Amino acid sequence: MSTAAPSNERLFSPPAAACAWLWPGLGHIVLGEKRRGLLIMFGVLFLFFSGLLIGGFDAVDRVDDRLWFLAQALCGPIAFVADFINQSVIKDPNVLASFDETRTTGLARVNEIGTLFIALAGLMNLTVIIDALHFAPKDSGRDGSNAASTPRRRSEDQAA
């Protein structure tokens, strides 16, 4: 009796990659890896929203920080929503006039750190998109469930 070794075959799944861009972690949830998708969602969105809390909405700026925005846009539509809020609310002179000398843009290094956090979230989501695009099914040994990796238990019969 012979057992077949797990194959290293990977599936090509563009819809899962598109879902992974639309919302971080959604691609893996669509592929059936709910726990992994939720962990990815938590990690990417934690970095993204931490960057917004640190640097403000000014940390996402496709007009003034175009190169940074290329990395940030990999987070999906939420980066475009944050940029829209920045362009239409924060940088709008009519809105700024109602805030008597209140500074609404990020300051120096704090803004740069927020920009970096959001760009790192986008680059992390890029690796997730690529992983969802070239997906290895669970039965291919990816989850580590093969017999060689599971620990063996000593039974009482072996001890005697």
Image (tube, helix red, strand yellow):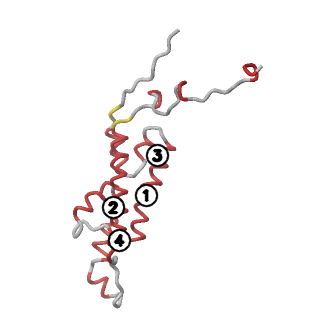
Residue at figure coordinates x 37%, y 27% from the top left: 9
- Element under disc 4: helix
Residue at figure coordinates x 69%, y 25% from the top left: 154
Asked whether the residues under the numbered discs 1 and 2 touch, taking CB atoms below 8 Å apart as contact, a structural biologist would say no
The crowd level at tag 4 (other Cα within 10 Å; few <14, some 14-19, many 20+) is many
Q: Callout 2, which amino acid?
A: Ala
Q: Which mark is residue 115?
A: none
CA distance separating discs 4 and 2: 10 Å
In the rendered image, which residue does mark 2 sit on?
79
Whether 106 is drawn above or below 2: the answer is: below
Viewer-nearest residue: 30 or 73? 73
Sequence order check: which comes first, mark 3 or mark 4? 3
In the rendered image, which residue does mark 1 sit on?
45
Q: Callout 1, which amino acid?
A: Leu
The crowd level at tag 3 (other Cα within 10 Å; few <14, some 14-19, many 20+) is many
Q: Callout 3, which amino acid?
A: Gly
- Element under disc 2: helix
Asked whether the residues under the numbered discs 1 and 4 touch, taking CB atoms below 8 Å apart as contact, a structural biologist would say no
In the rendered image, which residue does mark 3 sit on?
37
Q: Position of residue 144 (x, y in %)?
A: 50, 32
